[in-house]
Image (cartoon, coloured by chain):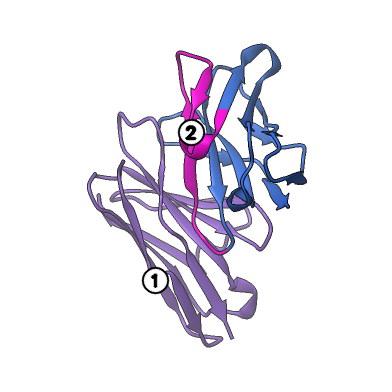
Amino acid sequence: GAVVSQHPSRVICKSGTSVKIECRSLDFQATTMFWYRQFPKQSLMLMATSNEGSKATYEQGVEKDKFLINHASLTLSTLTVTSAHPEDSSFYICSAITGGRTEAFFGQGTRLTVV
Amino acid sequence: AQSVTQPDIHITVSEGASLELRCNYSYGATPYLFWYVQSPGQGLQLLLKYFSGDTLVQGIKGFEAEFKRSQSSFNLRKPSVHWSDAAEYFCAVWDSGNTPLVFGKGTRLSVIA
């Protein structure tokens, strides 16, 4: 199956700093990537959808200025959590799809802890 | 809009017993259906998927799921549960194209000796 690599797997940052999470499709071109957030013992909540070369579409309630998403190429999307606060601590997972596929492929997730 | 319901938040089964996790979906046509498993602190692992053909789908780790259109269900089953199956299980629906998967709230499986 196709591989999606997400990096870093874990990150601890200080309050007020920014953190960048990368999501790469290693063996296919991802026309669309999705970013999810998962709180402890809860399901995955879609944050935003990004298409290569265009602005991301954010779900209602997600601050686009806090969660900056860039999908600059067909193999890379980044999520930057700006001015992080402890309440941004969560598990973030990316997913990628490409035309003709019958499933979405998920990264391994990033555990963000803001102290 | 699509939606997925997993009625059971937490299920406990004895090791060696059979398992069935329920999933119901709401969608106008037949979507693509998935079951994922997630161990604590880990990402998602795809167990199986259905998008057409035989309504009984075999997956990894001895799991299977049956698509029942009349009941809008896609229940996950395993004949004999192992302690290592303890995890969170998510059912998801996708209508393909450039849309995201929609996940159920998950069912936490505990396995006791």
Height in image: B32 above or below B113?
A: above
Q: Amino acid at mark 1?
A: Pro
- C-alpha separation, residue under disc 1 versus residue under disc 2: 27 Å
**Numbered disc 1: what chain?**
A
Q: Residue at x 59, y 86 (%)?
A: A115
Q: Is residue B93 left or right of residue B99?
A: right
All told, the count of numbered labels is 2
**Numbered disc 2: what chain?**
B
- Point out residue B95 in the picture as x, y percentages from the top left corner: 49, 28
SS assignment at label 2? strand
- Point out residue B2 in the picture as x, y percentages from the top left corner: 61, 30
Q: Which residue is mark 2?
A: B48
Q: Local crowd at mark 2 within 10 Å, few (<14), some, or many (≥20)?
A: some
Residue B91, located in which quarter of the rendered image? top right
Start and end of the magenta stretch? B41-64
Location of the N terminus of chain A by quadrant is top left
* B47 magenta-colored: yes
Residue A37, located in which quarter of the rendered image? bottom right
Chain in blue, by letter, is B
Q: Which residue is mark 1?
A: A8
Q: Is residue B93 left or right of residue B4?
A: left
Q: Is residue B73 left or right of residue A107?
A: right
Q: Amino acid at mark 2?
A: Leu
Q: Looking at the image, is mark 1 or mark 2 nearer the viewer?
A: 2
Q: Colour of chain A?
A: purple
Q: Toward the viewer: B10 or A96?
A: B10
Q: Residue at x 51, y 70 (%)?
A: A111
Can residue A52 be seen?
yes
Q: Local crowd at mark 1 within 10 Å, few (<14), some, or many (≥20)?
A: some
